[in-house]
Image (cartoon, rainbow, N blue to C red):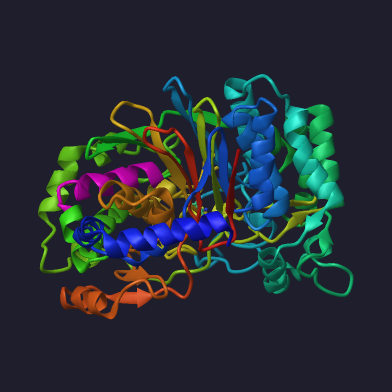
């Protein structure tokens, strides 16, 4: 801790203990542990908050060379494919929300598409049961959808890049990181080791993630030569190379050799699309988020609309009342998710109805302050458990005030665990986000309906929720997003409520403990040390079932624009190893 930090801490401690007004304010807001948060990282010009300090720095370097937030985001996304292989990717997909300084806002959908050979029952065996292991939707060659990341970056650059840096220049930092390597952090070394068993059936993956006869250790330089060669091809021949050139051929050949679904034709047919974001206001602040094929935006807005009718501020930030009403909002919105949501290119999704304020008003009337609802009465279904999670979000703000909020993923940690031979590219297992057997829970215990059944060319329903919140004058206030499967939507919800209702800064809002309810299983999940025993009992007394999650939820990355000064405040989640970098 340097002298400046010590001074700031002393000042805060003094204010807290000496100033009665500040103390009262804390108490009226419910008094929570987030008072111990570190200060957000401050910068005058540009900021990147990501889960990898190296990737954040790549984005800042791009902005210093004249690139805008979109240019920087592209370079960050490609760099994360090297430095954060569990979720950063070329072999997956995601969503990039862009808000330009002039107010134009758009959503780039580069979600994976189901291969042509996929069909409604592709993951069922002869008895109609879900296939497990190789051949199923979770691991191995048949679990992957056609990757969208490269096409998404291409579309973003073409339409919203500054024009001051070209594609090859934005690929270069990733290529260099893969070719020259970088020292492994403690977190990455641990994660590669922890996943060794999962990689074991796939020789190519073991070759990339382990050295001959052992594991890479913390501090050791890790190189990915085949991935570097893939980046070099992308630089030479442009982004279509991924879908039509040698890279596509290598992916298709490896798929063919292992009974995978993706063909060269599927690669050629992949398209990224621009979508119209969904919007609402929450207590006068505009919230803009991701539309289908994500459920994130609509579910988030439905919950915010429900909560707007409660005096959250008065309840207090870590009170049982707050958790109670939040849970009831989550229960209702996730029940709707299961019933109504899917790829709107294929099925009708009643987004307008779901995000309508009067619809929320009706739902709110069913919430009793003194008693939990049950998910059986809100809607019927089958409970199931939660599992591990890996995706990644980053946020970028440039000197002009353009902003990118990007969440992308391989789905599970290290996706399908399959590295495509000769490419260094780890493939996703996004097909598990479809309802492989509608009504039966997926890896996240999510029940999903017919609208999200598998079909060729369709995009699996997502929960990723890259989001912007504006000030009443229409300028950006903050942008945020997170990994965490279905917990993503609730993480973003709680960050927004923490800022708007409880006056937290972006770091405090991200640090504060979170809960999760997803309709089924009918239980509140909370983080280690996340609920006091009193709060726990008060919720139980209302009839809630509560379980502690073994792991923390999410890895939010946010940037807030400071009022009056315009300083960019970067915040990375303490739940993982991320770090914002600004200049
Ligand atoms: O798109 C989705 O909703 C999931 N595939 C996201 C997976 C995820 O966030 C895993 N995370 N930690």
Q: Residue at x 17, y 60 (%)?
A: 315
Where is residue 71? Give x, y as percent. Answer: 64, 30
Lateral position of residue 530 relative to residue 266, left or right:
left
Q: Quadrant of residue 87?
A: bottom right
Q: Considering only vertical position in the picture, is 504 above or below 152?
A: below
Where is residue 175? Give x, y as percent. Answer: 80, 42
Which quadrant holds the N terminus? bottom right
Q: Nearer the viewer, residue 434 or 210?
A: 210
- Magenta stretch, overall SS: helix
Lateral position of residue 50 relative to residue 534, left or right:
right
Q: Quadrant of residue 467?
A: top left
Where is residue 76? Give x, y as percent. Answer: 65, 41
Task: Let me know if residue 5 is in the magenta part.
Answer: no
Q: Which residues are magenta?
A: 296-311
Q: Residue at x 80, y 40 (%)?
A: 231
Q: From where the camera sits, is residue 133 visible?
A: yes
Q: Nearer the viewer, residue 431 or 511?
A: 511
Which quadrant holds the C terminus? top right
Lateral position of residue 273 relative to residue 200, left or right:
left
Task: Let me know if residue 305 is in the magenta part.
Answer: yes
Where is residue 540? Give x, y as percent. Answer: 21, 77
């Amino acid at each position: 801790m340097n002298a400046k930090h010590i001074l700031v801490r002393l000042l805060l401690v003094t204010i807290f203990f000496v100033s009665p007004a500040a103390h009262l304010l804390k108490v009226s807001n419910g008094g929570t542990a987030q008072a111990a948060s570190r200060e957000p990282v401050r910068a005058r010009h540009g900021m990147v908050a990501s889960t990898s300090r190296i990737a954040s720095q790549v984005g800042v370097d791009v902005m210093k060379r004249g690139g805008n937030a979109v240019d920087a985001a592209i370079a960050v996304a490609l760099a994360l494919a090297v430095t954060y292989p569990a979720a950063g990717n070329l072999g997956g997909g995601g969503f990039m929300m862009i808000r330009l300084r002039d107010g134009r806002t758009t959503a780039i959908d580069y979600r994976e598409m189901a291969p042509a050979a996929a069909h409604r029952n592709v993951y069922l065996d002869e008895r109609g049961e879900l296939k497990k292991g190789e051949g199923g939707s979770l691991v191995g060659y048949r679990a992957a959808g056609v990757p969208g990341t490269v096409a998404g970056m291409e579309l973003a650059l073409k339409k919203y890049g500054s024009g001051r840096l070209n594609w090859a220049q934005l690929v270069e930092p990733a290529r260099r990181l893969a070719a020259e390597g970088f020292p492994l952090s403690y977190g990455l070394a641990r994660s590669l080791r922890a996943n060794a068993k999962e990689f074991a059936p796939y020789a190519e993956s073991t070759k990339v993630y382990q050295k001959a006869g052992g594991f890479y250790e913390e501090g050791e330089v890790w190189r990915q030569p085949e991935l570097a060669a893939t980046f070099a091809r992308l630089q030479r021949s442009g982004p279509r190379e991924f879908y039509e050139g040698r890279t596509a051929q290598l992916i298709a050949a490896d798929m063919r050799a292992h009974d995978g679904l993706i063909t060269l034709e599927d690669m050629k047919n992949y398209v990224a699309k621009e979508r119209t974001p969904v919007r609402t206001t929450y207590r006068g602040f505009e919230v803009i988020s991701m539309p289908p094929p994500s459920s994130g935006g609509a579910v988030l807005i439905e919950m915010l609309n429900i909560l707007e009718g409660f005096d959250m501020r008065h309840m207090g930030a870590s009170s049982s009342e707050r958790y109670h009403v939040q849970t009831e909002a989550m229960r209702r919105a996730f029940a709707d998710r299961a019933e109504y949501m899917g790829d709107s290119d294929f099925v009708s999704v009643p987004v307008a109805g779901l995000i309508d304020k009067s619809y929320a008003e009706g739902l709110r009337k069913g919430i009793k302050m003194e008693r939990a609802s049950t998910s059986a009465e809100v809607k019927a279904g089958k409970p199931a458990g939660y599992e591990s999670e890996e995706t990644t979000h980053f946020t970028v703000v440039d000197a002009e005030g353009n902003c990118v909020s990007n969440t992308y993923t391989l789905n599970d940690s290290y996706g399908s665990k399959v590295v495509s031979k000769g490419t260094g590219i780890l493939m996703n297992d996004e097909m598990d986000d479809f309802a492989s057997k509608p009504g039966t829970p997926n890896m996240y215990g999510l029940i999903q309906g017919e609208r999200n059944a598998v079909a060729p060319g369709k995009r699996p329903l997502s929960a990723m929720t890259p989001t912007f919140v504006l000030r009443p004058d229409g300028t950006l206030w903050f942008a945020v997003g997170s990994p965490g499967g279905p917990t993503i939507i609730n993480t973003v919800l709680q960050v927004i409520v923490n800022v708007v209702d409880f006056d937290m800064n972006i770091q405090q809002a991200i640090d504060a403990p979170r809960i999760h309810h997803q309709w089924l299983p009918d239980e509140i999940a909370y983080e280690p040390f996340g609920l006091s025993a009193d709060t726990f009992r008060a919720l139980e007394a209302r009839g809630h079932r509560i379980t502690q999650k073994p792991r923390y939820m999410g890895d939010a990355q946010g940037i807030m624009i400071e009022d009056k000064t315009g300083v960019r405040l970067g915040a990375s989640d303490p739940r993982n190893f991320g770090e914002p970098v600004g200049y």
